[in-house]
Amino acid sequence: MNLSSLGFFRSLRSKNRQFAVIGLGRFGRAVCATLNSLGYEVLAIDNQEQPVTQALKDEIAAHAVQLDSTQRLALEEAGIPDFDTVIVAIGNYVEESVITTLNVKELGVNYVVSKASSEIHGKVLDRVGADLVVFPEHEMGCNLARAITRPGILDRFELDPDNSIVELRVPAEFNQKTIAELDLRNKYGVTLLALTQPENTEKFEVNPSPITQLQTGAVMVVIGNNRGLERLPLEE
C-alpha cells in the first residue's frame, strides 16, 4: 500500500484517461511515470529536446513534444484543448509557469494543476485560473520532518489540516490485543481501516473483525484526527 501519492493523484481522477504534463523536471517526470504506470495516456511536453527524447526512451509517456508552452499557438497545435486535465510542472521559472497556466486555461482545458515554488507564486497561479496549486517541495519537507521525528509511521496522507490516514507498524503495546480491546476510537479518536499479518505486510485485510488480534511485525492503517494520531504509541 502506498499512500504517499494519493494526495496528488486523487486530484487527477477523471473519466478522461488522457493527461498532458508540461515540464519534464524531476516532478514532471515522476507525474508522467506514475500516470503511465496506472494505464493513462500521457503527453509529455518540454521546451528542451533532451528531456523529451529521454521521456520517449524511458517510455514514461505515450507521446512527447518539444515546444515553448508560453506560445499559445504551439499548445493549440499540440492538441492541448483536447485534454481534460493538464499538469503544469514548471516550478522554477515563475513567468513561464504563470503564462503556461494562463494559456492552458484560455484554451479551454477543464482542469489545470500547477506546481508552485513559493507562496506568492501559488497565489499568482490561483489568480490566473489554476484549479489546483501544489507545493511538492514543501510537502516533501513536511514528510521528511515527520519521518525523522516519528519513524514508526511508514506513510501518511493528509485529508485536510486536521485529519489524516497513516500507515504504521503495530506497536508492542498493542501486541496480542483485539481491536475491540484496544478501543482505538474512544482512546485515541482514530479508526482502524486495514491490517496485515506479520508474515505478509503487503496484503491488507480491510475493515477487520473487532475480535481480530493485532501482532507486532504487522502493519495497520488508521484514520483520525491528527491530535489523536500523534498520541498513538509507535514501534521504534
Image (cartoon, helix red, strand yellow):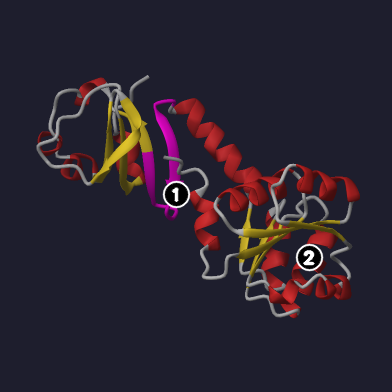
Q: From the viewer's perspective, is residue 100 above or below residue 187?
A: below
For disc 1, the neighbor class at 10 Å (few under 14, some 14 to 19, many from 20) is some
Q: Is residue 138 left or right of residue 230?
A: right
Q: Mark 2 points at which residue?
A: 98
Residue 218, x across and y down, in percent? 29, 27
Return the residue nearer the eye: 141 or 221.
221
The kind of residue on which mark 1 rests is Glu
Q: Is residue 218 left or right of residue 113?
A: left
Residue 180, x across and y down, in percent? 10, 39
**Circle 1/circle 2 CB separation < 8 Å:** no
Q: Which region is colored magenta?
A: 151-166
Label 1 SS: strand
Residue at 80%, 66% (x, y): give it: 100
Q: Earlier in the sequence, mark 1 or mark 2?
A: 2
Residue 157, x across and y down, in percent? 44, 46
Q: From the viewer's perspective, is residue 61 above or below residue 95?
A: above
Residue at 13%, 28% (x, y): give it: 177
Question: Disc number at residue 217?
Answer: none
Q: Name the residue under label 1.
A: 158
The kind of residue on which mark 2 rests is Val
- Looking at the rendering, in which quadrant would you find the N terminus? top left
Label 2 SS: helix
- Looking at the rendering, in which quadrant would you find the C terminus? top left
Residue at 10%, 34% (x, y): give it: 181
